[in-house]
Image: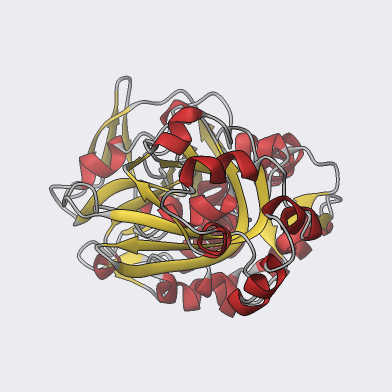
Amino acid sequence: MKKLLIIGAGPAGCMAAISAKTNHPHWEVVLIDKNTRICEKLRLSGGGRCNISANVSIETVIEQTPRNGRFLYATLQTMNPIHIQQFFAQRDLPLVEEDHKRLFPITHKADDVANVLLKELQLLNIKFLFNMHIQQIDLQNRLVKTADDILRFNHLIIASGGASYSNTGSDGLILQELKSNIEITPLYPAETPLVCQEALIQSKCLQGLSLQDVGLSLFIDGKRKKKVVHDLLFTHFGLSGPGPLQCSSVIGPAFEENKKVHVVIDCLPSVSIATLETMLHTMSLGEVLKHFKLPKRLIEGYELLSKDLSIVQFLKSWPIIVHDVRGFNQAFVTWGGVSVKEIDPKTLIIKKYPFVSVCGEAIDIHSHTGGFNITIAMSTGCHAGKFFTQ
């Protein structure tokens, strides 16, 4: 019996195993992970509720994937948000929609998502090898060496993740191991909070304040690289929340290359400057904030900035310098991984090694928060398990 090894038991690896055994029942499918159970990182997603996907089109998934999104056209035909909803509904865990089209399991428990995957794996008689620390991957001889064993394979699927949340097992070590044979693009934290050292942030006068649906534009060396309307949270170190996280997705190596990064905040993206100027003829800042249901605490922020900004500038084009991003321990995903140039997008097979496939966050693809990254993990996992060589 031919043997398929899958390294990584996250959503990509689990879906790859399910797809492989479903499409190739005569193969032995073995799922390897350094943890003692599947889906450790997934169990933390969505605050433990698991924002598993988004109720959007294939085109929107690609649009929400700033890093190599077009590479996903083929995989999203195999599994997309509609298929994901059907998969879980058929296994008695329907998904429910929340704001921004986000999909969660009806129980709001990430463990329930993991349990559905585990039950499916068990029904298909997938073999598990947990607590396995890989020391070497020998592609020439088709061997995976661990501290205790040497595993032979006919085909190998890399689903080991990136370098974010390393305590869950996705520490980037497998990617480093592959570097001598396959091009691995540099790894950077993405979908992570922004670090700002300006006096306003250091004063902590706005710490804990959240704003809904504000406009955020991110600039690198004066050129706008990202524009988004989403929620924002002021923290003791800078900016967090979905808006800043999405902005972080395009920063990558900017700081390493000594580029200047800043964001511009538009507190009222649906209100024109002319309208605001007219209102300020007869209304104070406090009255304007109350009218638009913005927090009164913003006045404290403006008091620190009033020497440099008018009220209109503060509400419509408030610049904040970004000095860094939070590291991999707070990044939702990884920028970097196996270069898409190395991979056949129709099969996810490595071109130089037709007996090796790659899926999930191990590929140099990342998307925004909101269910898109787990969608990509499941989509590429399902595709890799379907199209590996015979």
Residue at 18% across, 47% down: 179
Q: For the view shown, which residue lies furthest in the front direction?
A: 282
Coloring scheme used: secondary structure
Horizontal side, residue 200 vs residue 221: left or right: right
Residue in front for this viewpoint, 341 or 280: 280
**Residue 264, percent from left and from top:** 45, 60
Residue 22 seen in the current view: yes
| Residue 275 spot, x, y in % from top left | 67, 76
The residue sitting at 71% across, 56% down in the picture is 284
- Residue 187 is left or right of residue 38, and the answer is left
Query: Which percent across, then down, holds residue 22?
Result: 62, 60
Instruction: Work out which residue is located at the far top of the displayed protein and give it.
Output: 148
The residue shown at (71%, 62%) is 100
Q: Which of 312 and 68 is in front in this view?
A: 312
Res 10 visible: no
Q: In which quarter of the image is the C terminus?
A: bottom left
Residue at 28% x, 65% y is 354
Residue 367 vs 238, above or below: the answer is below
Between 176 and 234, the residue placed more toward the observer is 234
Above-or-below relation of 88 to 276: above
* Residue 143 placement: quadrant: top left
Q: Where is residue 266 in the image (x, y as percent from the top left)?
A: 56, 62
Q: How many numbered tags mark residues here?
A: 0
